């Protein structure tokens, strides 16, 4: 096995695991109960009447 093949196997196996862990962490961070108010405020932001219209 050449060095290139070894690096390729390492990148494919551990890279997939890294991306899976990153995805799970992002989902947990997004759906964490304490972040609900932040996302609720962001969802209502376009409907605020205090904002001046863009021209």
Image: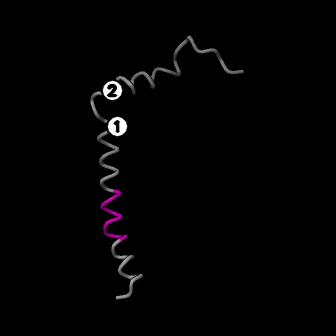
Above or below residue 3? Residue 25 is above
Q: Quadrant of the N terminus?
A: bottom left
Magenta stretch, residue numbers: 11-19
- The residue drawn where x is 30% and y is 48% is 24
- The residue drawn where x is 53% and y is 22% is 46
Residue 50 x/y as whole percent: 56, 11
Q: Look at the numbered disc 1 and give the secondary structure of its residue.
A: helix
- The residue drawn where x is 31% and y is 56% is 20
Number of callouts: 2
Q: Look at the numbered disc 2 and give the secondary structure of its residue.
A: helix
Furthest residue in direction top, as rendered: 50
In the image: residue 49, left or right of residue 15: right
Q: Which mark is residue 16?
A: none
Label 1 Cα crowd, 10 Å radius (few <14 / some 14-19 / many 20+): few
Furthest residue in direction front, as rendered: 3
Above or below residue 54? Residue 18 is below
Earlier sequence position, callout 1 versus callout 2:
1
Residue 29 x/y as whole percent: 32, 39
Look at mark 1 in the image and give the residue it sits on. 30
Residue 32 placement: quadrant: top left
The secondary structure that most of the magenta stretch takes on is: helix
In the image: residue 45, left or right of residue 29: right
Label 2 Cα crowd, 10 Å radius (few <14 / some 14-19 / many 20+): few
The way the protein has been coloured in the rendering is one colour
Look at mark 2 in the image and give the residue it sits on. 36
Tell whether position 54 is magenta: no
């Amino acid at each position: 096995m050449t060095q290139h093949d070894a690096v390729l196997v390492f990148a494919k196996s551990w890279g997939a695991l890294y991306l899976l862990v990153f995805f799970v962490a992002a989902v947990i961070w997004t759906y964490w109960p304490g972040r609900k108010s932040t996302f609720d405020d962001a969802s209502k932001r376009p409907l605020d009447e205090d904002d001046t219209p863009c021209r």
